[in-house]
Amino acid sequence: MKRLRRVVLLILTAGAAMAPHATAETPAAADAWLARPVDDQTFQTYLDFFAYDKKLPFDLRVIDTEEKDGVKREHLSFQSTRGVRAYAHLYRPAAPASQRWPSVILLHGGGPAGKDNPGVQLMAPLIARAGLNVLAIDMQYFGERSTDLLTTFTEQEKHDRIYNQQPVYLAWVTQTVKDVSRAFDLLVEQRGADAKRIALVGMSRGAIAAAIAGAADRRLAAVAMLYGGHFDALERGHLPAACPANYIGRISPRPLLMINGTHDTDMIKETSVEPLQRLTRQPRLILWAETGHQSTLTEEHRSALLRWLQESLK
Amino acid sequence: MTISAGTRLGPYEILSTLGAGGMGEVYRARDTRLGREVAVKVLPANRAQDPDAVARLEREAQAVAALSHPNILAIHDLGKDQGVFYVVTELLEGETLRNRLASSGLPWRKAVEIGAAIADGLAGAHLKGIVHRDLKPDNIFITRDGRVKILDFGLARLSPVLSQQDQTSAPTTPPQTEPGILMGTVGYMSPEQARGSSADTRSDIFALGCVLYEMLTGRRAFARPTAPETLTAILNEDPPDVSESGKQVPAGLSRLLRRCLEKNPEERLQAARDLAFDLRSILSDSELDKTSSGPREAVPAKAPGETSPAAEPPVRAIVPRGKSAFLYGGLAGLVLLLIAAGLLIRRTQETSRFRAVTAGLEAAAAGGRLDEVSGLLQEKGLDLGDERLAGLAKRVAGTLSVASDPAGATVAVTRVQPLAGFASRRPLTIGRAPVTARLIAGEYFVRLAADHMNSVEFLEPVEVGKDLRVVRKLLASTAASDGMTLVDEGGSAVSREGEAVQAFLIDKHEVTNARFLGFVSAGGYRDQTFWPETLLVKGKPMPWAAALKGFVDRTGLPGPRSWSGGTFPEGKGDHPVVGVSWYEATAYGRWLGKELPTREQWWRAALGDTHGAFPWGNDVKTAEVRANFGLVGTRPVGSYPLGVSPFGCFDMAGNVREWLRDPPSDSALRSVVGGSWEDPAYMFELSHTEAFDPAFANEAIGFRLVRPVPGR
């Protein structure tokens, strides 16, 4: 009976989410739902979006490996959901581990190269050199998972074809959360990672997805959002099942880190970031830099991120 | 210290001695892990024991190792074994340029080819912020197969003969004891190095100018009997013109050489990449002159006393008369028959070979692989003007017609695709405007250059079967237009109605540290005429004198926040100035009679009438090749030619964000646009315009300036 009720709610929620007349709100009109995230019962229905087949074979393929500056990088692909391959780079400290390493799953921002975006290429080895595994995955439509859906990767195109297309966006968020859960399983089952010490770090668009995946997959030990918010400046409409406002408060009691720029015109401080921060719960660390929206962190905040990871994944 | 054969240094087994230099002994060795032969340089013991020197060597060697440039000696490894510090490099077979020049100068074409290859190597290194500091013929190697390699990149600092300290301690190393070594170094030093100032990328250009001069004339540019006299000559005298050596070289080459050897680095040719480009343009110009001068040039040159084939008497005139006439006639007929048969066979063979070549071309063309078609034509030495390729040309080529105002600009084009390898691709000079060229369809980097005019560069897409016509108005080179390009009147890319923006001039490049130093040195921070009486700092009015206390460098001296000691970081003269607030950018502009661009001006300069998302079009996927979004700091301005805007502005996307003149909706703030080295590429897009306090400065914000068109 309980299961049936959840299915009904799921259909109602998804349907409502995709009915523009019922839910299309401009960001300015979003204050009401931002102040009041969905209740637990509704939230449980959202989790059904993210159910995945744990027994599906990974069909893991190692494409190549390289070692540079004390970091080993494995280029690999695996079956994330049936018939859908995900591509990733696994960065590991070159020194042999005396114990099982803590790990990070890293989600990139909206640049076309995905896990090969300069921000990821800078950040991932940095974290690995601090003694953590980093599995940087391509999110759907980016990097090695590019399709004809996005060709120029301009902001306008991404919004016209994904972020402001509610059914497409919901499917994209759902796939991304499943990718994260499968990446988690892969790290533990195929690469010997410590299941109790895996954090999720997202950058920009990946940070929005990280808030959702972090609440959906409770095995993740901590979540960091770098230059994320609850929507970006070009997004229109409100999709409850894909809105971080309904998830971010549910990351607690696991640690949450948010790093943002005061002059960010993509994730705007007053309208996108601070309202989301008000929904967070302890333990949380909120840091601001006097910067715009960027794909790297200040020196100070890089150190803060590494300290926070080591503390959260003890 | 000499190491005997068979000794192991780490995994390297010493085989034999190769030689010795300022760096220490050099050995041929075998890498026992990879089974290949390498060169191992062992540092002198006194240097290897200096931890600072070794640390610096390690840093620089790591940077050079990351270069991987075909014109730079590759560094494989660094190591220390049994107290011996060593550097492992690729092993080259050939000779140094010093040996090659031992007897005389080189033919000018050869000198220019070698010079262009050296400039390519320097450009690659400068792009990574590495300066050689000791370029000279001894440091340039020509392999047996003709490849040019620059040696000892970054290692030169450790060379005792280069150290300023050692120079001044000359009594212990009197010039006459080691004249070759000492003069060899001093003779290529730039004036700024001779004065004891720091070297930057332009110092390498000066040194390359000296090397070019020596290759052309066989004489050193500043040859003097003693080191002090040589230094004095470098600082105060110009070398004799190349023509005085009796060598005939193109006038453009002499001019280019003078630009390399300018005493003032500001007036010197600024970028090695430009030098490579200009050298190749001179080569291709001369090729063009040869082919366009018609039959006169087509007559083969003949040595004195040689008979011209055209002047030979007709065959019948030499046939002897008499009894043997039939015999001779028969023999002559046979010979003619054999020649005809030979010609027929040869033609058949040539046709067969040509078909084999064009089979590859045809397959590539049929598959739409135009880059491959272009590569094959170049490889086989064929061009689309060959009548046998007329059919192919129709399917793969279009035409580009370029006119300039005034007419006569030299037009050079470089195929953009494939993007990899663009920097080393040789530009093709297609003639003087107006000119039309048939080109394989694709994107081309076009450069128009004329005497006393600012050059202009831009990208054009050539399409199959279409005639693309381009007309460019050139800007006269004056003090006021220095480094600027003309933006025509036209619709604004950012105003809703596309309102017209009046024509204006804009800096081709972001304002560099070196240029900004002129303002600081001239007392720009002390002269209030360039500044408002009251400044807004974090929204609050503040008197000028009080506000200026915040506009200081890391050592408290007036200047950008990124500087120290009143000057910019070493080696970053050609990087964009950062750490400057909107007020400082505006004051610098007033000092020059310029101003920051308006929002409409900036976007018109960046996008023109293209309606693209980026200066090069819509493709953000190539952004990392076309712009500096690389997260590794600023790069010398103009390092990304393929990001050039339709009006010839470089680095509008990436490198540094740029201040705009007018405020956004919140009048207390000022806009920055274009994205920077620390941003994702999409931050270039209009929707990502950000705004900061006008007194704010950081490592990613710089600026460029505009001024009205003269006479309007």
Image (spheres, coloured by chain):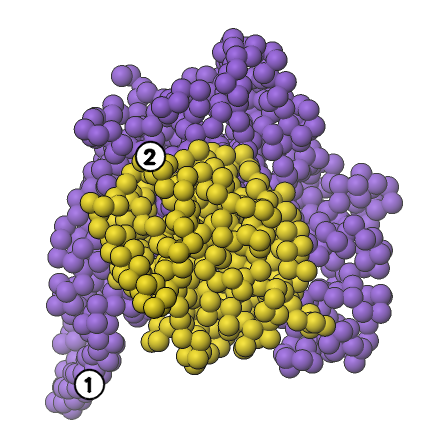
Task: Quote the CA–CA distance across marks 2 and 1.
Answer: 83 Å
Q: Where is residue B36, by image quadrant?
A: bottom right
- Residue B298 on image: x %, y %: 25, 59
Kindly identify which residue carries mark 2: A28
Both on one chain, marks 2 and 1? Answer: no
- The residue positioned 82% from the left and 72% from the top of the image is B3
Tell me, what hue is chain A?
A: yellow
- Residue B257 on image: x %, y %: 49, 41
| Kind of residue sitting beneath label 1 | Ile
What is the tally of numbered marks visible in this picture? 2
Task: Confirm whether residue B304 shows in the render.
Answer: no
- The residue positioned 41% from the left and 42% from the top of the image is A36
Q: Where is residue B645, by image quadrant?
A: top left
When the figure is inspected, residue B57 is found, relative to residue B646, above or below; the finding is below
Front residue of B503/B410: it is B503
- Residue B658 on image: x %, y %: 43, 32
Front residue of B668/A232: it is A232
Chain colored purple? B
Q: In the structure shown, which secondary structural element does the residue marked by tag 1 occupy?
A: helix
Front residue of B611/A259: it is A259
| Kind of residue sitting beneath label 2 | Ala
As drawn, is B641 to the left or to the right of B38? left
Q: In the structure shown, which secondary structural element does the residue marked by tag 2 occupy?
A: helix
* Residue B330: mark in rendering: none
Specify the quadrant that holds the C terminus of chain B. Answer: top left
- The residue positioned 25% from the left and 68% from the top of the image is B369
Kindly identify which residue carries mark 1: B345
